[in-house]
Image (cartoon, helix red, strand yellow):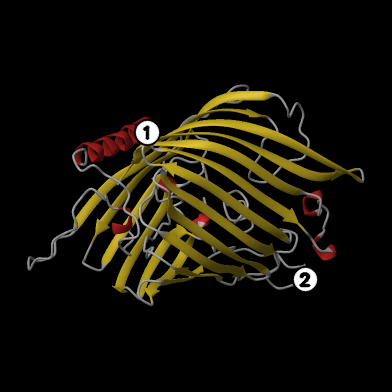
C-alpha cells in the first residue's frame, strides 16, 4: 500500500514536469493577489482578456528538498538542548526534508482551491548511528479554499500557515536561508506543541485585503489553536492579525518570498499579533530587497517578537507552564550576484527566556538561563531560479542553561548541502 502511494506521487510529479517543461517556469513576484496566481510561472504570458466564457483549470506541481548533512549530536535548533552524551561527536546522513505534491484549481474567476501533501518530517532519512526511517503515507499539509471578492477583501478557509510575522508566512521555495527561522514562532510547529499546530498550520478562516493603492496589506484570522485545557470542556478561538506597508513595489503574494533575486524594489514594514487564552505573541518585522550596484541586489530580513504564556496558572485558558516569557530576534542578509547567480548570506537568531516566578513549575525548561542563539552563513546557487537550485550552509546553535546552580553553555554545529526541485 505504501509502495503504490509513492509510485502515484512520483507519477503525478513527473506528469506535471513534462506538461510544463516548455514554460520556463519561475516564481512570480509582487504581481497578483490570488493564492494560486502568486505562485504561477513568470515565463508564461498573462491570460488575455477575452469575451470567452470562463473555464476552470487545474495545476499540479511539487517541491522536493533533499540534503546531505554532517552535524554534532547536540545540535538541536528547534528547542535548544542542554548537554547530551557525546554531544560533540559528528554524525553524517542524508534526508528528504520536504516531498510535497501540490494541487491547485481555479474554480471560478474569483474562487480557487489549493491542497498540498507532505511526507512527514524525517520519514525519509538515513543518519549514521540512528534507525533508518521507513517512508510513511503522505498526509494533508495545506487544504484551503479562497474567494477573492475584490482586492480589498478575500476569504481563505481551511488548513493553512499561521504566523504573525513574515518568515512564518513564506513559501518554502523562496527562502533566503536553507530553512525557516527557528524562534520567531516557537511552540507553533507540531501537534505536541502548546498551540497544537501541524507543521505551522492551523484550521480556521482568514480575511485578507490590499488597499491604499496596493500599499497596505491586512490579514485577520480565527483558528482552532489549542483545543484542550486542563479542567475545561471548551476552548477559545485563536486570533492572528497582521498589517504590512509596502513603501515601493506592491507585494501581493499570498506566500511571501525570502528573496526576490533582483526583481523590483521591495521595502515592507510589518507588525502582527497572535493570541489565545493567556498566550500572546506580538512582533514587528522589516523586509528589504533592493538593487545595489551593477552586480546585483541585497536582501535583508529582520524581526522581533515578544511571546508569553502568561503567569497565572489558575486562569481559565492558561498557557502558563507551557510557554515561557521570551524575546526573539531574527536577522538574515544576503547579496545576489545576477551574473553568477550566487547569493552568499549570513543569519542570526536569538531566543532569550525571561520567565516570571509564577511561570516556573517543576521543570528547568522555564529557567531564564535556558536561552538559545543561532549563527549561520551559507551560499545559494540559483542556476535555475527557484525551480532548481543548490544551497550550502554552516550553522551553529548555542544553548545556555543552569546545572546545579551554575551557568553552562554548549555550542554545536551543522554542515548542510541541499538541492531544491520546485514547479507549480
What x and y, as percent, mark residue 83? Answer: 78, 35
Residue 389 is situated, as x and y percent measured from the top left of the image, at 39, 36
Q: Name the outermost residue toward the left.
A: 51
CA distance for labels 2 and 1? 48 Å
Q: Nearer the viewer, residue 72 or 318?
A: 72
Relative vertical location of residue 156 with respect to residue 121 in this rendering, above or below:
below
Could you tell me residue 297's position as x and y percent?
Answer: 43, 48
How far across and down, in percent of the image, does residue 187 sit?
A: 63, 55
Residue 112, placed above or below residue 85 = below
Q: Which mark is residue 92?
A: none
The structure residue drawn at horizontal position 28% and vertical position 52%, both measured from the top left corner, is 40
Secondary structure beneath dot 2 equals loop
Asked if residue 248 is positioned above or below residue 374 in the image, the reply reads below
Circle 1 crowding by C-alpha within 10 Å: few under 14, some 14–19, many from 20: few
Q: Which quadrant of the view contains residue 114? A: bottom left
Mark 2 lies on residue: 314
Q: Would you say residue 201 is visible in this rendering?
A: no
Query: In the image as oriented, which residue stretches furthest toward the front?
Result: 293
Amino acid at each position: 500500500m505504501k509502495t503504490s502511494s509513492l509510485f502515484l506521487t512520483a507519477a503525478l510529479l513527473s506528469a506535471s514536469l513534462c506538461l510544463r517543461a516548455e514554460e520556463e517556469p519561475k516564481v512570480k513576484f509582487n504581481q497578483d493577489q490570488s493564492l494560486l496566481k502568486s505562485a504561477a510561472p513568470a515565463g508564461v504570458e498573462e491570460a488575455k482578456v477575452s469575451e470567452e466564457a470562463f473555464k476552470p483549470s487545474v495545476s499540479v506541481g511539487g517541491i522536493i528538498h533533499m540534503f546531505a548533512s554532517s552535524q554534532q549530536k547536540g545540535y538541536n535548533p528547534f528547542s535548544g538542548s542542554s548537554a547530551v552524551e557525546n554531544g560533540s561527536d559528528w554524525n553524517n546522513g542524508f534526508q528528504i526534508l520536504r516531498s510535497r505534491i501540490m494541487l491547485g484549481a481555479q474554480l471560478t474567476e474569483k474562487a480557487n482551491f489549493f491542497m498540498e501533501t507532505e511526507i512527514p518530517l524525517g520519514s525519509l532519512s538515513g543518519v549514521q548511528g540512528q534507525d533508518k526511517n521507513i517512508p510513511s503515507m503522505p498526509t494533508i499539509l495545506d487544504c484551503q479554499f479562497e474567494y477573492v471578492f475584490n482586492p480589498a477583501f478575500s476569504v481563505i478557509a481551511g488548513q493553512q500557515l499561521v504566523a504573525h510575522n513574515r518568515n512564518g508566512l513564506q513559501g518554502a521555495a523562496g527562502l533566503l536561508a536553507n530553512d525557516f527561522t527557528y524562534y520567531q514562532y516557537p511552540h507553533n510547529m507540531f501537534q505536541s506543541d502548546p498551540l497544537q499546530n501541524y507543521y505551522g498550520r492551523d484550521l480556521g478562516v482568514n480575511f485578507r485585503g490590499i488597499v491604499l493603492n496596493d500599499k497596505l496589506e491586512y490579514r485577520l484570522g480565527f483558528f482552532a489553536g489549542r483545543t484542550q485545557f486542563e479542567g475545561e470542556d471548551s476552548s477559545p478561538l485563536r486570533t492572528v492579525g497582521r498589517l504590512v506597508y509596502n513603501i515601493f513595489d506592491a507585494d501581493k503574494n499570498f506566500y511571501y518570498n525570502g528573496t526576490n533575486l533582483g526583481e523590483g524594489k521591495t521595502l515592507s514594514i510589518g507588525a502582527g499579533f497572535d493570541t489565545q487564552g493567556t498566550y500572546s505573541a506580538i512582533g514587528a518585522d522589516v523586509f528589504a530587497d533592493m538593487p545595489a550596484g551593477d552586480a546585483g541586489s541585497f536582501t535583508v530580513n529582520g524581526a522581533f517578537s515578544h511571546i508569553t504564556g502568561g503567569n497565572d496558572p489558575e486562569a481559565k485558558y492558561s498557557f502558563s507552564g507551557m510557554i515561557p516569557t521570551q524575546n526573539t530576534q531574527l536577522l538574515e542578509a544576503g547579496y545576489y550576484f545576477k551574473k553568477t547567480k550566487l547569493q552568499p548570506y549570513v543569519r542570526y537568531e536569538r531566543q532569550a527566556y525571561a520567565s516570571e516566578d509564577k511561570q516556573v513549575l517543576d521543570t528547568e525548561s522555564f529557567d531564564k538561563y535556558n536561552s538559545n542563539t543561532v549563527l549561520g552563513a551559507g551560499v545559494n546557487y540559483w542556476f535555475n531560479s527557484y525551480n532548481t537550485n543548490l544551497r550550502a550552509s554552516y550553522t551553529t546553535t548555542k544553548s545556555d542553561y543552569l546545572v546545579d546552580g551554575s551557568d553552562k553553555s554548549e555550542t554545536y554545529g551543522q554542515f548542510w548541502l541541499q538541492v531544491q526541485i520546485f514547479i507549480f
